[in-house]
Amino acid sequence: MIFQTSDDKGKNMLDLVDDKNNPLEPSYSKGSIWLQYFGHSNLLCTQALRAIVNHVPTGEYHLRFFPNEDFSCPCGNYPIESRRHILYEC
């Protein structure tokens, strides 16, 4: 609960919720409540963690570090490919 309300988690941390929109508390411990959503796939868990902490090569990332590269979404409906756009709209 403290983690969910804390400003110390960083602006890039994705708020996690379960199927009923209840907040999930991240934990790295084996068997933690949010890890069960990824099953037993290490690759899926790694990719999800990168998305949760916003360490993904999106257009937003390219705009910040490689401003001369294309940063638009491949769908053509959004000028800057962002994590939020990918997860909720695209």
Image: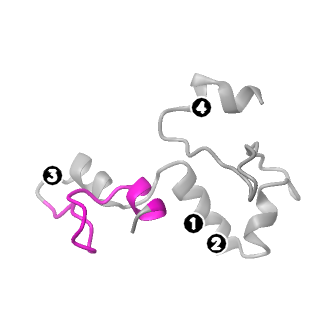
* Range covered by the magenta-colored residues: 69-88
Residue with the mark numbered 3: 67
Q: Is residue 2 magenta-colored? A: no
**Residue 23 falls in image quadrant:** top right
The alpha-carbon separation of the residues under discs 2 and 3 comes to 29 Å
Mark 1: amino acid: Gln
Is the residue 20 above or below the residue 37 in the image? above
Image coords of residue 7 (percent x, y): 57, 23
The alpha-carbon separation of the residues under discs 1 and 3 comes to 24 Å
Residue with the mark numbered 1: 47
- Label 1 crowd (10 A; few <14 / some 14-19 / many >=20): few
Label 3 vs 4, first from the N-terminus: 4
Labels 1 and 3 touching (C-beta < 8 A): no
Residue at 81% across, 64% down: 36
Labels 3 and 4 touching (C-beta < 8 A): no
Q: Secondary structure at mark 4?
A: helix
> In the rendered image, which quarter contains the C terminus?
bottom left
The alpha-carbon separation of the residues under discs 4 and 1 comes to 19 Å
Image coords of residue 56 (percent x, y): 43, 59
Label 4 vs 1, first from the N-terminus: 4
Mark 3: amino acid: Pro
Image coords of residue 11 (percent x, y): 48, 34
**Residue 1 falls in image quadrant:** top right
- Label 2 crowd (10 A; few <14 / some 14-19 / many >=20): few
**Residue 8 falls in image quadrant:** top right
- Label 4 crowd (10 A; few <14 / some 14-19 / many >=20): some
Residue with the mark numbered 4: 9
Mark 4: amino acid: Lys
The alpha-carbon separation of the residues under discs 4 and 2 comes to 22 Å
Is the residue 9 above or below the residue 70 in the image? above
Residue with the mark numbered 2: 44
Residue at 62% across, 64% down: 46
